[in-house]
Image (cartoon, rainbow, N blue to C red):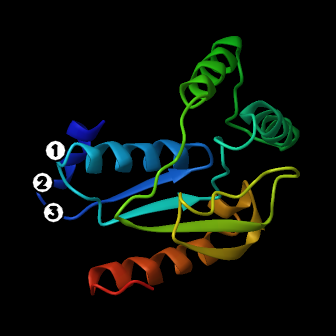
Amino acid sequence: MAKAVFGAAGGRPFVLLGYSSGGILAHALAEWIEGEGAATAAGVLLLDTYRHDREPAWPLTALALAQLLDRDHEFLVVEDRHLLALAVYLDLFADWTAREVKASSLLVQADRPLPGGIPAGPPLADRSTLVVADHFSVLADDCELAAGAVSAWLQGILIGETL
């Protein structure tokens, strides 16, 4: 993954972004890149990411999946292979413990959290902001608020300020 990031960035500053449990992956990649001394991401952006290293991930994932299936999704298909992949994906981080990274980081957190979820918080993000949304609408119906928070944070990174 790091090789793909470096190739896409072409020597320019880059921001790693992850939504939901993808934020864990973005943070873990930032840790790895810094640990290798290869570079430091300009930022790590977590969109409604929850901790996986303090509580078992399965209860929260089951809740998120149930809410996802309850929604009317014209393009949503969930097959056995998707559920198997989810189980393997969650197992990747079963023994992982988050460490702080040098990169500036922002958690954009929905104000209507998944019940029982522990928001990312430190050391995954050094800043956080609440937006009026739920776990799914933060990328859909309520994305303008999230985009505004992200835009302000990115502008701060570009001019060298920590917002």
Identify the disc placed on residue 7: 1
Percent position of residue 122, x then y: 58, 63
Q: Are marks 2 and 1 in contact (CB under 8 Å)?
A: yes
Residue at screen point 83% across, 34% down: 59
State the SS at label 1: helix
Question: Please, what is the three-letter code of the amino acid marked with disc 2?
Answer: Gly
- Determine which quarter of the picture holds residue 151: bottom left
Residue topped by disc 2: 10
State the SS at label 2: loop
Residue at screen point 33% across, 79% down: 157
Residue topped by disc 3: 12
Q: Are marks 3 and 2 in contact (CB under 8 Å)?
A: yes
| Drawn side of residue 111 relative to residue 107, left or right | right
Taking 71 as reference, is 95 above or below it?
A: above
Q: Alpha-carbon distance for marks 3 and 2?
A: 6 Å
Percent position of residue 31, x then y: 37, 48
| Drawn side of residue 94 relative to residue 11, left or right | right
Q: Are marks 1 and 3 in contact (CB under 8 Å)?
A: no
Q: Alpha-carbon distance for marks 2 and 1?
A: 5 Å
- Quarter of the picture holding the N terminus: top left
- Circle 2 packing at 10 Å, graded few (<14), some (14-19), many (20+), is few
- Determine which quarter of the picture holds residue 72: top right
State the SS at label 3: loop
Question: Please, what is the three-letter code of the amino acid marked with disc 1?
Answer: Gly
Taking 134 as reference, is 55 above or below it?
A: above
Q: Alpha-carbon distance for marks 1 and 3?
A: 10 Å
- Circle 1 packing at 10 Å, graded few (<14), some (14-19), many (20+), is few
Question: Please, what is the three-letter code of the amino acid marked with disc 3?
Answer: Arg
Taking 151 as reference, is 10 above or below it?
A: above
- Circle 3 packing at 10 Å, graded few (<14), some (14-19), many (20+), is few
